[in-house]
């Protein structure tokens, strides 16, 4: 008795279970996208599947406010307060898309090979696009004239990091603190003996995600998408990002998936000009500064 041959992607498109199979590919693609650690994982994220809007439309981000406590005065009724939150309109500014022409040879790939040869590289491309989008928003905090901008000296980089921590202390920010650094600032930090002595390296997974270590109260994460010679100290609620999937195309081999604040669509469509199939992965994207008090820009002198 011989083993059953794995189903090719070409057979999957024609299969009675094509929708279920397309869902598997979409979920796998999303898992790959989530696996690309970076700046997007450090900020507040909002995801919507089958988003009915498009570029120029907005999603609502609800940000809870601190509910103050007081000394009990003998009456709970007099101290009751409503839940407070602030609603922020986040505009969808981009339609991130990766489209790849699939030859007859590639259509004969089994699902696993297709995911490794096609889906994984597409996920990496979309992941890079998301990183550039949130980095562009974070770069506003290090632009010329940005409020509270701190200067870092290459000979004493820790002073700027400590000052950034103090600024966040004075803003009474609560939550995990991140320090996102550009390649130039990363270079300065790794050459600084004081930093290397206090920095604690994370797990292999963390290091692959760009995390250099923990130091001075911050988790230090590297990003090549930040502006040159800059760093941003912040907590996750300082910035927000929306990653929404367009509606599934029911007439195509198509599906969407959402997980951990990310949502995207994948579909296979026929190109009647080249007579080839196309693998398309896309998502609507937008990001914004939620609260300037929760982040501090740093500029390397």
Image (spheres, rainbow, N blue to C red):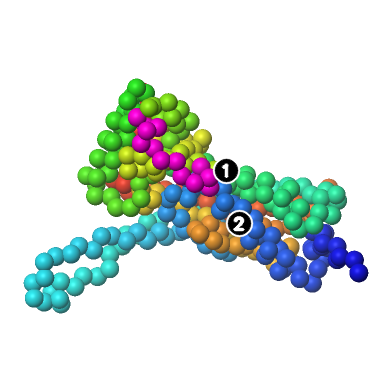
Residue found 82% across the figure and 62% down from its top = 6
Left or right: 109 as drawn, with respect to 225: right
Residue segment shown in magenta? 194-207
Residue found 36% across the figure and 50% down from its top = 176
Please identify the quadrant where the C terminus is shown: top left
Q: Residues within 10 Å of mark 1 (few under 14, many from 20)?
A: some
Question: What is the quadrant of residue 200 in the picture?
Answer: top left
In this rendering, the answer to whether 216 lies above or below 50 is above
Determine which of the numbered discs, if any, sits on residue 30 in the image: 2
Element at label 2: helix
Q: Quickly name the residue at label 1.
A: 128
Left or right: 160 as drawn, with respect to 214: left
In this rendering, the answer to whether 150 lies above or below 28 is above
Please identify the quadrant where the N terminus is shown: bottom right
In this rendering, the answer to whether 70 lies above or below 143 is below
Residue 219 in percent (x, y) is at 39, 44
Left or right: 71 as drawn, with respect to 154: left
In this rendering, the answer to whether 92 lies above or below 255 is above
Residue 30 in percent (x, y) is at 60, 56
Q: What secondary structure predominates along the stretch shown in magenta?
A: helix
**Residue projecting furthest to the left:** 73
Q: Residues within 10 Å of mark 2 (few under 14, many from 20)?
A: many
Residue found 32% across the figure and 61% down from its top = 64
- Regarding residue 183, the answer to whether it shows in the image is yes
- Regarding residue 58, the answer to whether it shows in the image is no
Q: Which label's residue is closer to the chain start, 2 or 1? A: 2
Residue 160 in percent (x, y) is at 31, 32
Determine which of the numbered discs, if any, sits on residue 187 in the image: none
Residue 180 in percent (x, y) is at 42, 39
- Nearer the observer, 283 or 203: 203
Magenta stretch: includes residue 238: no
């Amino acid at each position: 008795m011989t083993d059953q041959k794995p189903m090719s992607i070409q057979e999957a498109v024609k299969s009675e279970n094509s929708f279920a199979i397309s869902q598997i590919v979409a979920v796998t693609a999303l898992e790959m996208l989530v696996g690309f650690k970076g700046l997007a994982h450090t900020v507040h994220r909002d995801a919507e599947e089958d988003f009915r809007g498009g570029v120029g439309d907005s999603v609502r981000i609800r940000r809870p406010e601190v509910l103050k406590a007081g000394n009990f005065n003998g009456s709970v009724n007099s101290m009751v307060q409503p839940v407070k939150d602030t609603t922020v309109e986040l505009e969808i500014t981009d339609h991130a898309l990766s489209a790849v022409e699939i030859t007859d040879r590639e259509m004969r790939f089994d699902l696993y090979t297709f995911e490794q040869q096609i889906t994984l590289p597409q996920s990496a491309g979309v992941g890079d696009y998301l990183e550039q989008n949130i980095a562009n928003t974070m770069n506003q905090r290090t632009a010329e004239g940005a409020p509270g901008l701190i200067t870092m000296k290459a000979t004493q980089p820790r002073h700027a990091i400590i000052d950034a921590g103090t600024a966040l202390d004075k803003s009474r920010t609560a939550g995990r603190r991140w320090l996102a650094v550009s390649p130039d600032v990363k270079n300065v930090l790794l050459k600084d003996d004081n930093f290397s002595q206090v920095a604690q390296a994370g797990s292999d997974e963390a290091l692959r995600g760009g995390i250099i270590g923990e130091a001075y109260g911050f988790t230090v994460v590297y990003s090549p998408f930040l502006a040159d010679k800059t760093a941003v100290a912040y907590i996750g609620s300082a910035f927000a990002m929306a990653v929404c999937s367009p509606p599934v195309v029911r007439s195509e081999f198509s599906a969407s998936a959402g997980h951990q604040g990310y949502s995207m669509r994948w579909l296979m469509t026929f190109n009647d000009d080249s007579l080839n199939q196309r693998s398309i992965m896309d998502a609507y994207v937008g990001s914004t500064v939620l609260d300037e008090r929760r982040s501090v820009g740093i500029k390397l002198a």
